[in-house]
Amino acid sequence: MTQTQPRVYKNFTPRMGVYVLRCPASDLTLLDLSPHVEGGVNRVRFQLDAGVYPDKDIQRRWTASGPDAFELEVLDELAYDPSKPADHDYSDELTELESLHRERLSLEPRPRNARGLR
């Protein structure tokens, strides 16, 4: 490990945003937001590949059709505002970004207190 690697890690800023899971064959579109969007995408892909995704219907579709039948991608990112403090909570901005994409994709609003892809 070089001396610069810890410094790079400490300065890491995750990308925030909205990601989508689509199955065009079954007209399935699920949307979620994350303060670490790559981590969210990786989590969903890992759970589906491992067969432990919480929504059993989606897991069955993934297992039956295979990963090639699905699209899992980052839809949009939210940029950090340099005028805000480093510890600013971007939850409201992420929720608004998700709502915009739900409207654009004609998806139902997220139920209150719902977590994960909906």
Image (tube, helix red, strand yellow):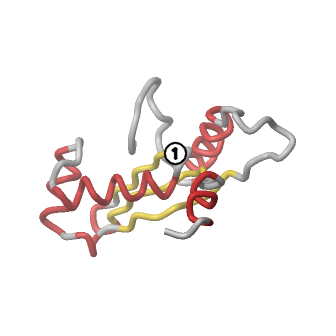
Q: Position of residue 31 (x, y in %)?
A: 45, 49
- Counting from the top left corner in percent of width and height, residue 79 is at 72, 53
Is 65 drawn above or below residue 40 in the view shown?
below
| 97 displayed left or right of 108 | right
Furthest residue in direction right, as rendered: 83
Judging by the rendered image, the residue that carries numbered circle 1 is 34
Which sits in the foreground, 27 or 85?
Answer: 85
Image coordinates for residue 61, horizontal then vertical, percent: 18, 59
Q: At 19% from the left edge and 70% from the top edge, which residue is drawn?
A: 66
Image quadrant in which the C terminus is located: top left
Q: Residue furthest top?
A: 112
Q: In the orientation shown, which residue stands out farthest toward the bottom?
A: 68
Please give left or right for residue 115 compared with residue 51 in the image.
right
Amino acid type indicated by mark 1: Ser
- Residue 51: which quarter of the image? bottom left
Is residue 2 depicted above or below 17 in this figure? below
The x, y position of residue 9, in whole percent, is 57, 57
Q: Residue at x 23, y 48 (%)?
A: 53
In terms of image quadrants, where is residue 12?
A: bottom right
